[in-house]
Image (tube, rainbow, N blue to C red):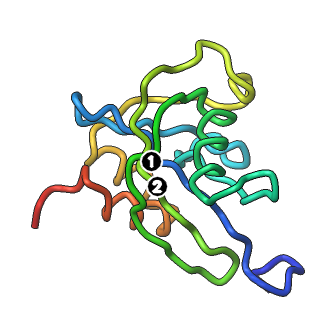
Amino acid sequence: MGTKGRSTPRVVCCAIPIARSAGKVLIITSRKRPNHWVLPKGGWEQSDVQLQDAASREALEEAGVHGTITRYVTTIPSESATYHFFELDVSTLDAVWMESHERRREWVDYAEAVKRLEWKPELSQGLKLSTLAPSR
């Protein structure tokens, strides 16, 4: 069962941390799969007023990112979770953050980020719908 015992899919909020002037996105390593890259993401909690609040909180906890949510990107349902994506314009990065001993982070260009996220289709699809994606 893909919902891991839940009756409904998990609500996951995902930040796409962007350095807009450089055209870069910040990706982080997965805790479960340290050789795989992800976007900061995690479950919506009752203390989060809105979905974008959860995306901001996850970016701070997982990547030490401070910034402003500037755009809702998309919602992508999967069997186990419903992913909500938000662009986050990064203003500063903490040198040490809550999960800094468990994760690495790296600024990469859009094409490299898509390539590194391909193993997790929801994440690469969310990024492909962001404003960093080349115009079609």
Q: Is residue 131 above or below residue 103?
A: below
Question: In this rendering, would 125 be left or right of 119?
Answer: left
Task: Check the image and name the residue furthest to the left.
Answer: 136
Residue 8, how many percent across, how many down?
78, 84
Instruction: Pick the quarter of the image with the C terminus.
Output: bottom left
Picture disc at residue 86: 2
SS label for mark 2: strand
- Choose between 13 and 53: the one closer to the eye: 53
Which residue in the structure is indicated by mark 1? 16
Q: Quadrant of residue 52?
A: bottom right
Residue at x 60%, y 26% (from the top left corner): 64
Residue 41, how many percent across, how many down?
62, 51
Question: In this rendering, would 13 be left or right of 7?
Answer: left
Task: Check the image and name the residue furthest to the top.
Answer: 95
Q: Which tag is nearer the camera, tag 1 or tag 2?
A: 2
Residue at x 68%, y 54% (from the top left corner): 42
